[in-house]
Image (cartoon, rainbow, N blue to C red):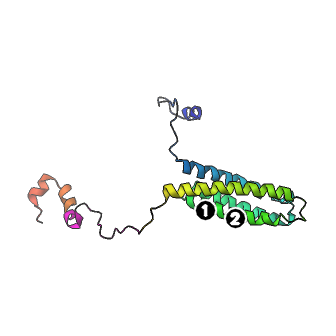
Amino acid sequence: MNLIANMMRSKGDPKIRRSGPSSLSASDRMARNLGWFSIALGLTEMVAGRGIARALGMPDKEALIRGYGLREISSGMLCLSIDKKAGLLSRIAGDGLDVALLYQGLDRHNPKRDNVALALAMVVGIGVLDVAATKLALAQHGRDPGPPRDYSNRSGFPGGVKAARGRARETFRTPADMRENPVVA
């Protein structure tokens, strides 16, 4: 990576010898990785919906699987955005939908129910990761429980509004202006 970064630098700029640790926390890295995974899975479901439906023995669910692909892509994009918590929570909800769909495929008349059981185990495993990532993100980025803070009595001016009045005029006046037009408070 440093090689590419150094190739893009102008002549005379210092070169990168080694890069330091990531500025992302563990929960942010986990959310980012789950976001990219979600986008890749969603694209796979969109492109190979028919093959996935056949492999699960549920050929009548092709359109639903493609729709789930769109849901995965949107969840992944949310995980990569500023609002990681919403993306992670939508992934958990999506895991619930996936489990509900796969549970239908466990019917004893489905010749490919072993594939469904494997897919179900994978969804449950990824769901555990989603819950863990969400708990980490909420612990790091969540608000402390309790009543909301009340800032209604604050003006934003040090010393209050009365102390701030006329201070800009005093600050930006020249000594000549002060002699000609003294400020009377």
The type of residue carrying mark 1 is: Leu
**Picture coordinates of residue 166, whole percent (x, y):** 19, 63
Disc 2 crowd rating (10 Å Cα; few below 14, some 14-19, many 20+) is: some
Q: Nearer the viewer, residue 114 or 137?
A: 114
Nearest to N terminus: mark 1 or mark 2: 1
**Picture coordinates of residue 100, whole percent (x, y):** 75, 66
* Residue position marked by numbered label 1 in the rendering: 89
Tag 2 secondary structure: helix
At a point 85% along the width and 63% down the height, the residue shown is 58
The type of residue carrying mark 2 is: Gly
67 sits to left or right of 1: right
At a point 57% along the width and 48% down the height, the residue shown is 29
Distance from label 1 to label 2 (Cα)?
11 Å
Tag 1 secondary structure: helix
- Check if mark 1's residue and mark 2's residue have beta carbons within 8 Å: no
* Residue position marked by numbered label 2 in the rendering: 96
Q: Nearer the viewer, residue 135 or 66?
A: 135
